[in-house]
Image (spheres, coloured by chain):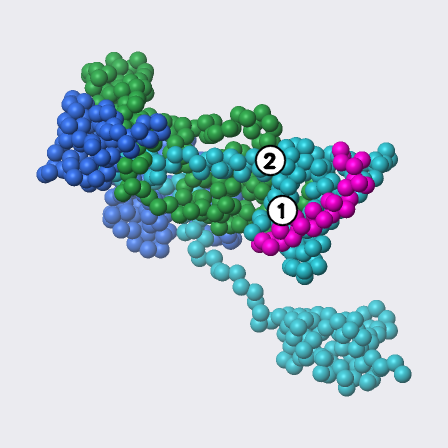
Chain colours: A green, B blue, C cyan
Amino acid sequence: MSEERKTSAFTVPPMEEQERMVEAVLFASAEPVTLREFEARMPQGCDPAEALVNLRNRYDGRGVHIVKVGDAWAMRTAPDLGFLMREETIESRKLSRAAVETLAIIAYHQPVTRAEIEEIRGVSVSRGTIDQLLELEWIRLGRRKMTPGRPVTFIVTPGFLDHFGLESARDLPGLKELRAAGLLESRPPSAMMPPGPETLEEDEAATGQSELFED
Amino acid sequence: MSEERKTSAFTVPPMEEQERMVEAVLFASAEPVTLREFEARMPQGCDPAEALVNLRNRYDGRGVHIVKVGDAWAMRTAPDLGFLMREETIESRKLSRAAVETLAIIAYHQPVTRAEIEEIRGVSVSRGTIDQLLELEWIRLGRRKMTPGRPVTFIVTPGFLDHFGLESARDLPGLKELRAAGLLESRPPSAMMPPGPETLEEDEAATGQSELFED
Amino acid sequence: MMDTAQQPFQNEAISVADRMAAEALIVDVDGFEGPLDVLLTLSRTQKVDLLKVSVLQLAKQYLAFVEHAKALRLELAADYLVMAAWLAFLKSRLLLPPDPEDEGPSGADMAAHLAFQLERLQAMRDAAARLMARDQLGRDFFARGQTQNVARVRTTTYSATLLDLMQGYARIRTRDDFRPFVMDRDNVFTLEQALERMRPMIGFAGAWTDLTSYLPEGWDNDPVRRRSATAATFAASLELVKEGQAELRQSETFAPIHLRRKEARA
């Protein structure tokens, strides 16, 4: 926190009190709360980041955990107690194999274009698959790629991280090994690449991308 | 963790573990939970009543409390922290078309009387529109016009210039530039050219255009 | 590839195995997500590390699969056939000694790239499985069940951009001379109209006739209309000549153009 704030504030609440505040705010919210939101809600001069670290230690090993989701924080029940929550369990729509694979490719290769997803899977991505993942708010549009045609890219969202209990996309299981094995690279395409779907349906793929951009 | 679970099916989990369970169930449940419901959910032989008493003590003085609601139990944020649960949202709304047009006329033709605005717009200007612009502090009263009736005039404010990122109202693009930027579809009206900087070089206008397109 | 030396001895055995594999695949061809998926499944029958997979053997298995599908008159999607053609090409590259004159990637490079693609797809499938096996929100761990109402204090601000302002102004200032763009069709005689008019007439034009006599009635007084009708009629007559139904002639520059029916060759 900046010096000005500390001095300009009347009295900064003690850390003990700040912890209570962070706890109450986290508890009350179903969605992860960002540091910025904490700062906006708490009295001036508070240090929610430090309070969160303290609180996280306090909840260590309890039935409820403090977890970090991207640049936000949330309270979640301990995963080993899931068996107690049969009533709360949300029956989620089963994702198709294509959707699951597409999601994994986006998570591990992000930012990734539709053509790249198709290259990896060896089939064209149906519009519905991307739609479904967008609807679940597990993926969103990233920056356009600086390649000819400036295609849109996809990246995963904080909602994705929250759902799979990941602090950041860097914590994806096996990410390091995959990178070390060179499996997250596309390898410079040689002239004689096996035929992918893009060679067959180039127009269609291009339309799909521009359509997505329209949305 | 799975170790504990396995044993819990046969032996009664330690009180520490029962506390965790009660905590997780209380947290995740949408409604207050009765002792009976706790018993039904938790492994056989558990004593949720005792676990609740322990948990309640543990949360004493924290940001979250364990409270009894009728014959059921619930978690609630500490009453003294209620002020944190207020979220200030700033809703941004688009200015109405009438207001935008009125504002544009004032900016381009200032100082301008209400009658002149109406003449240019071709419709009468509602009191509310002028009031709104005055309230936003984007326009203010200028000098009275030296014409019969000495009508009041309106001019734009420094706040207006600030909001629209203009050094002065003269920096507003003229019709020629608007056309160059593709904002005008047709020929300029012969009468009443706007007091815009029409002397600008074509090159400059072209630069303006590309800038507009970048956005 | 490694297997090439052993090929003469194994040829028969592989082809039987391939045929059996192909048969197994064909039962469920709809269940496959494209040729790469089929190749990945086939590669599993080799029971080796994907990096060491014999691409040559894989190509043969795949080609057997496609052949078999054809024999059964199964409709295979185009991309399966494109892959088959590519693999046949790759196979010939792998079997023939490399041509030093030849440019482009060698057969080994192409095979290596295919092996890489298969390994990468398998890696993504494993990653997807591991991802879905993770503890998930709403299934294994839970968010607060009863979220507290957060009182919302709303303040409304109004915004407009410079663009809004400029467009607003442009809208007012150009309102009077704005007219939606519509083609003025009243004074245009189209090629289609002219053709429609001339087709039934040309059969009777045994003798050379001035083109202007074909102009539709009511189109020769107003210069604009006459110009359009003349152009369309001329274009239509060229069309008829092209179709072999008419002949055109002009004695000198700017002289009248004459038209007549083209006689069928005896």
The residues colored magenta run: C1-30
Residue located beneath label 2 in the image: C120
Location of residue A171 with respect to C214 vertically, above or below? above
Residue A2 among those drawn in magenta = no
Q: Amino acid at mark 2?
A: Arg
Residue C252 at x, y percent in the picture: 86, 71
Residue B130 visible, this orientation: yes
Residue B188 at x, y percent in the picture: 50, 51
Q: Nearer the viewer, residue A202 or B27?
A: B27
Marked residue chain, label 2: C
Residue located beneath label 1 in the image: C38
* Mark 2 or mark 1: whose residue is earlier in sequence: 1
Q: Amino acid at mark 1?
A: Val
Prevailing SS of the magenta stretch: helix
Q: Nearer the viewer, residue C141 or A7?
A: C141
Residue C12 among those drawn in magenta = yes
